[in-house]
Amino acid sequence: MRLGKNMLETSNPALRNHNVWDEGLAAGGVDTASVGGVVNKTGMLTSVAIAGGMFGIWLTQNQPGLAWPLAIAGIIAIFVVYFMIMANPLRAKQTAWIYALVQGAFLGVLTHALDGALEQMGYTAMGGLALQAFVITISVLISMLALYYFRILQPTKKFVATVSVLTLGIFVTYMISFVMSFFGAQMPFLSIGSAMEGGNAALIGIGLNVLILGVASLWLIIDFGMIEKQVKSGAPKQMEWFCAFILMVTLVWIYLEAVKLCFRLAVLFGNRD
């Protein structure tokens, strides 16, 4: 059996290689993948990521000098593990755990750094940025899956094309902002530094942040829709781990945007010590 080309229609880069699924089918196996199995394994990887995040926060609290070296090492490790999974997705059962752990630790370091920045400015975020961003991420996940389950939103070709174009625009903008940072410049409104400017700049920054968070959230509709199609095509059970990894990629982006949004809101509307 050869899987259809619909796999190529997703905006999640982890789903673009349809050969992944062909290799999985070639591996054979009596049991086939199920949506429930993917959800369960996504929950497992999310738990590992949370544990990694807690470790990252604990480590930087006790060894603050390690924060940015760990962040840089984390980024490198994330890319290495990501491409390892893409090169051999049938081993995602082993390598996806590493990705979740390292990614969680990186997010923990980043979140703790932003919490520290708020504290230095005299602002407080109720419950901390990590808790707020986690609640937003879970809420988005539940909402998007509900919208998909009740067929309110479906990954039609037009829907996928629109989200893909928006995602490409966001990626290009982020790359330009990254290059500008090397020259000591910031992208107006987009950079998190705009939160400190107050006024219209801060409000526009929040609006852009919400827009990008919305686009990231729509990835869940697209990705879960594509996964469901492939599950119905009879993909082997082992591919559930690869599907869970795909969803983790999307959830990480959602969490990142949620953290930035919570930071902006804390600066603009939060209580000052």
Image (spheres, rainbow, N blue to C red):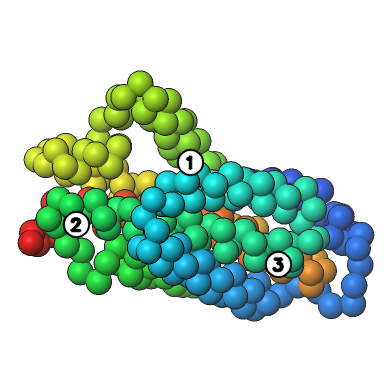
Q: Nearer the viewer, mark 1 or mark 2?
A: 2
Residue located 42% across and 34% down the image: 174
Which sits in the foreground, 113 or 216? 113
Task: Sort mark 3 into few (<14), some (14-19) or many (20+) by Cα contacts within 10 Å.
Answer: many
Tell me the residue that label 3 is attached to: 241
Q: What residue lies at 49% left-to-right and 60% top-to-bottom? A: 105
**Which comes before the other along the chain, label 1 or label 2?**
2
Spatial separation of the CA atoms under disc 3 and disc 1: 25 Å
Whether residue 80 sits left or right of residue 109 in the image: it is right
Q: Residues within 10 Å of mark 2 (few under 14, many from 20)?
A: some
The x, y position of residue 133, in whole percent, is 34, 63
Mark nearest the camera among 3 and 1 is: 3
Check disc 2 and report its element: helix, strand or loop.
helix
Name the image quarter holding the N terminus: bottom right
The reply to whether callout 3 and callout 1 are in contact (CB within 8 Å) is no
Q: Which mark is residue 167?
A: 1
